[in-house]
Image: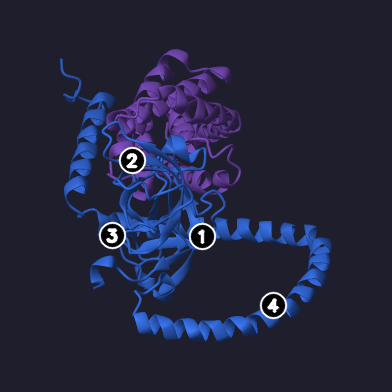
Chain colours: A purple, B blue
Amino acid sequence: MNIRRFIFNFIFVLLSFILQTTVFRVIDFGGVVPNILLIFACSTAFIKGDKQGIWVGFFCGLMVDIFFGSYIGFFAMIYMYLAFVVGKLHVVLFSQNIAIPITIITIADFVFGFVCYVLMFLFRTKFDIGYYMTNIIIPEMVYTALVAIFYYPLILKIHTYLDELEERNAKKFV
Amino acid sequence: MSPIIKKRGEEFTLPSKYLLFILTGVCIATIVLTFNTSLLNGPVNSFAGIFVVPFQKGITAVGMGLKDTTDKLSSITKLLDENEQLKKQVDELTIANTNLEQEKYELTELRNLYALDAQYEDYKKTGARIIAKDAGNWYHSFVINKGTDEGIQVDMNVIAGGGLVGRVVDVGPDWAKVQSIIADNAAVSGMVLSSSDNLIVSGDLELYRQGYVSFSKLVDDADKVSIGDKVVTSNISDKYLPGILIGYISTIDDDSNNLTKSGRITPAVDFEHMNEVLVLLDLKKNMN
């Protein structure tokens, strides 16, 4: 990972977090915000493979932990594992077709919601999964998918641009 | 052959599964560390203060500015009508005020006489603006724009519109994280004002969507507590100052053990449309 890519990732993690906690809090639907950090982590993992996905996912989760988590490392782990699994799909499924990544991000957000429910609510004997599904997990998933349709192409474009730059630099030294 | 053994002429790279293992270990270590100690608070808080909070403050300020201007433009005509009415009201109120002032004098005299406990009007407090809300949809915590520089400490109580909002759980140089009482992982020791019975108020995600928080462990053998009674923070709470309004009882049910009661409370604060809060600068543990 070169310095340019590092700076890009760093800025986008910050940007996604700030968007999620301020701008989208104002334009939420029924108190539900889209999970932009997850979109960014999964997009990066899907475009660049599991290794970068792990790093980006780790730091995305860490942002949530620092501000809103009770224990530092909890969300970092969830985001990291999701990005790792999505990154594994990079080899098999990566193409320019936008439908595939959007579907993957949607599924990832559903899994994220479900894991959150199990770890934070089911363990405290709150069993009404139907309620949490219809009021939080599914709305969040739909909203996240909607935002991903616009956010993913942006991330893809910047990554392709950075790839081209790297190739050009590599050719210079041959 | 193990993939981490370096081959000649090949650049050394760590396979992703090993990276995953290492970072998982780091995560578990930090979870354990933050669970047991507060070692990590310093560096982490300063990171947040440098990189994130300034942006959140800026965006919130811009957002509020935009909203203010649009509101201003759309409401000029309405304001003109209102102004007329208000002028009339001012006249009426001035008369009422003189009456009240006389009564207030009487009241202070009587209060002194009875040496009543301090109301929370007497607590020192400072206003703060909410600059970010929880990143997820599960809990209701938020970040305000004041921190240790303004004298805010962990466990200080936060109120808005006369009712209890929550307490500070984490603090940095110029920001503080507030856990609200409606969050699913929050609980407050409360007291019914009319009968001085203690109860536990706990946030509930399911109920909150309908506009309630739940209460439990109310011991009320004499059936004195009724719907509409005021619930305030109790004297025995170790984090919350006594006598802060939480809300009003809206339903009461008998528990299956026939000893205690539980039910719902309508909170006094509108948590959905909360932009500014007041932080009470007195700590419970410093009060006598």
Q: Position of residue B240 (x, y in %)?
A: 32, 60
Q: Split into 4 quadrants, where in the image is the N terminus of chain A?
A: top left
Dot 3: within a 10 Å radius of its alpha carbon, few (fewer than 14), some, or many (20 or more) residues?
A: some
Q: Are marks 2 and 3 in contact (CB under 8 Å)?
A: no
Q: Are marks 3 and 4 in contact (CB under 8 Å)?
A: no
Which residue in the protein does label 4 denote? B93
Is residue A103 in view from this perspective? yes
Is residue A97 in view from this perspective? no
Amino acid type assigned to the residue bearing label 1 in the image = Lys
Query: Mark 4 or mark 2: which comes first in sequence?
Result: 4
Q: Is residue A94 above or below residue A170?
A: above
Q: Is residue A7 above or below residue A80?
A: below
Q: Disc 2 is attached to a residue of which chain?
A: B
Q: Are marks 4 and 2 on the same chain?
A: yes
- Mark pair 2, 3: CA separation: 24 Å
- Mark pair 2, 1: CA separation: 44 Å
Q: Is residue B255 above or below residue B141?
A: above
Q: Which mark is residue B57?
A: 1
Dot 4: within a 10 Å radius of its alpha carbon, few (fewer than 14), some, or many (20 or more) residues?
A: some
Query: Mark 2 or mark 1: which comes first in sequence?
Result: 1
Q: Position of residue A11 (x, y in %)?
A: 47, 46
Q: Which mark is residue B239?
A: 3
Q: Residue at x 46, y 21 (%)?
A: A107
Amino acid type assigned to the residue bearing label 4 in the image = Leu
Q: Residue at x 54, y 48 (%)?
A: B272
Q: Name the foreground residue: B2 vs A146.
A: A146
